[in-house]
Amino acid sequence: MALSDTEIKKYHQDGFIVPEYSLPAETLVKIRTSYDELLALNPEFKDYCPALLQYNLSFLKYARDPNILDMVEQILGPDIILWNSSFFAKPEKNGKETPWHQDGEYWPLSPLATCTVWIAIDDATKDNGCLKFMRGSHKDKMLRPHLTNDNQNFTLHQQIRDSEYDDDKAIYLELKAGQMSLHDVYLVHGSEANLSSKPRRGMTMRFMPGTTVFDRVKAKKLHKDLGVLDHSDRTIFLMRGEDKTGENDFRIRH
């Protein structure tokens, strides 16, 4: 399920695309079941599980989907490393808001490069808090000024300054269950709270090229300086090609 030349151009122009490929219904059922099992053991993840593979390696098989890897390869090149997978639950009635931010603000990658695959596990609509993007905000490859906001109704606490986005220009990414988006690490994005009667679950896969180093020392520093999640003990997985840097550590940690 390759991306067309038009889709690849749109990804680089806008910072995101919604490809034609969708996960089949039976795969979605398995993901929901696996997440329910994870939640039963770890109720603290009712809103957000930042590191699925740390708790259940069975989620790794979804990142091995050859159709997904084919699309990511067209964006990043032949050397692909999965460095994280997470789950945004957004339960009905009280699903938390994710403020406008750039992922690269708190990720320990050098140089900074990631294609995020965001998969809708339920229908994602404007009513239940679908993703929203600032189209083209990735182009300058710059991290905008952020501040820490400890609002307990936020899933993340790094928030971009108000001067760096315009809500009136937000692109709301409504997806059917099984659909997915691919977006750039520098893209400004967020999502609103879910006050509807329907859940809005989404699963992410974070892929970096084999020319990037997952910097565990930087991860500890970001955790200390910004109070963000400590990624230093993350297990990363070589999905295709090779580690061009020779510096990445693929030792299984969990």
Image (cartoon, rainbow, N blue to C red):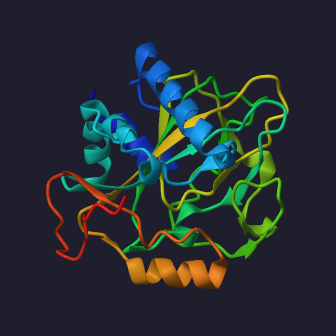
In this rendering, position of residue 55 left or right of residue 229:
left
Q: Where is residue 176 shown, x and y percent of the image? A: 57, 21
Which residue is found at the position 42% from the left and 44% from the top?
A: 56
Task: Answer whether residue 248 is visible to the viewer in this image.
Answer: yes
Tell which residue pokes out farthest to the top in this image.
Answer: 25
Quarter the C terminus occupies: bottom left
Q: Is residue 165 above or below residue 13?
A: below
Q: Where is residue 130 shown, x and y percent of the image? A: 68, 36
Q: Is residue 86 above or below residue 95?
A: below
In this rendering, position of residue 17 left or right of residue 48:
left
Which residue is at the front of the view, 11 or 126?
Answer: 126
Quarter the N terminus occupies: top left
Task: Answer whether residue 24 is visible to the viewer in this image.
Answer: no
Residue 95: image quadrant is top right
Q: Where is residue 86 shown, x and y percent of the image? A: 51, 48
Q: Is residue 107 above or below residue 5?
A: below
Q: Where is residue 96 shown, x and y percent of the image? A: 77, 46
Which residue is at the front of the view, 174 or 58?
Answer: 58
Total marks placed = 0
Which residue is found at the position 61% from the left and 24% from the top?
A: 122
Q: Is residue 119 above or below residue 139?
A: above
In this rendering, position of residue 30 left or right of residue 187:
left
Which residue is at the front of the view, 130 or 161?
Answer: 130
